[in-house]
Image (cartoon, rainbow, N blue to C red):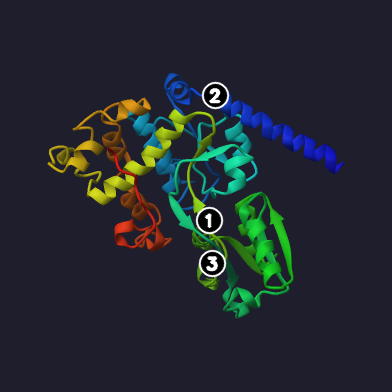
Amino acid sequence: MKSKLLTAVLGLTIAGLAGGAASAQTLQTVKERGQLRCGVNTGLPGFASQNDQGAWQGLDVDYCKAVAAAVFGDPSKVQYSPLSAVQRFPALQNSEIDMLARNTTWTMDRDTTLGLAFAGVNYYDGQGFMVKKELGVNSALELSGATVCVQSGTTTELNLSDYFRVNKMEYNPVVIESQSDVNSAYDSGRCDVLTTDASGLAASRLEMGSPDDHVILPEIISKEPLGPAVRQGDSQWLNVVKWTHFALLDAEELGVTQANVEEMKTSENPEIRRLLGEDKDFGASIGLSKDWAVNIIKAVGNYGEIFERNIGVDTPLKIQRGQNALWTNGGLQYGMPVR
């Protein structure tokens, strides 16, 4: 039975890789369709969720809008596909979506065996733990014997096992596919602990019946570089998504915002002029218009604006920039130069 299952899994993987390699004209396909198909989370406040009017919003959603703006000059030309952790990779491999912007960790296995190509890291994260205050727990090292709710098909599930094994602790996992069901199970008392990326814990706490009754423990047990991904085998499309990411970062570093982007076209700063298409047509090299970056910034602002609007200190999540600050401010975010 194990042999048959392994054969089936390998067959799906190879089929997915073959499909990705064969579809080396994604940009043209997207243009002809007139719409970008973007895979997002089924519902993670701050990253991808629907508001009361049914409109999608969040940091990852803004990346979908940014790519649509780069391609069409119109951020509304996006079809959102809400995907569970288990559904996300087959959807990309089978060309059901053009890009995945779903708080997905960049790992070696996903970059090789699954045939994904990551376009960058739009959020540096790490896995943590949340517990009810009434338990009086102050450290993850006090969790031996706990029942832990975790989402299936994620690096979270694997990191959880590693952490408890390394620290010689026992735990009882409650593994559930949907993150909303994971949250509900934890909130109802089915488990003692909820584990996911720290950003996800901040979002999940907001969905609890009494958010103030829960505390996020201080330990971060993993590296979770989250970012948008496409299929391997189409370097042009990878460049479109990758340089959209870099344009957002470069714009923040250069002080180009959603409000001043038109004014900045008259800047004498050569870096700004190259980014905004005033000196040389860099868009042509990736199949886009000369004003591709202008269209992105007009649509969603720069990276800092996206961050603060969706998850920053003035939002319910109240997340500090931290390691997601620009390199010039002591963070890890660094846009490659347009030149």
Q: Where is residue 157, by image quadrant?
A: bottom right
Q: Against 201, is 338 above or below?
A: above
Q: Against 64, is 148 above or below?
A: below
Give, as a three-letter code, the residue at label 3. Ile
Q: CA distance from mark 1 to mark 2?
A: 29 Å
Task: Give the residue at mark 1.
Answer: 224
Quarter in which the C terminus is drawn: top left
Q: Residue at x 60, y 44 (%)?
A: 110
Counting from the top left corner in percent of width and height, residue 52 is at 45, 46
Q: Where is residue 11, by image quadrant?
A: top right
Which mark is drawn over residue 220? Answer: 3
Q: Where is residue 167, by image quadrant?
A: bottom right
Counting from the top left corner in percent of width and height, residue 217 is at 54, 72
Q: Give the SS element for disc 1.
A: strand
Side of 334 where 1 appears, left or right: right
Q: Give the SS element for disc 3.
A: loop
Which mark is drawn over residue 57? Answer: none
Q: Is residue 84 visible?
A: no
Q: Against 43, is 275 above or below?
A: above
Which mark is drawn over residue 23? Answer: 2
Query: Mark 1: few, some, or many residues within 10 Å (few <14, many ≥20)?
Result: many
Q: Residue at x 68, y 69 (%)?
A: 166
Q: CA distance from mark 3 to mark 2?
A: 39 Å
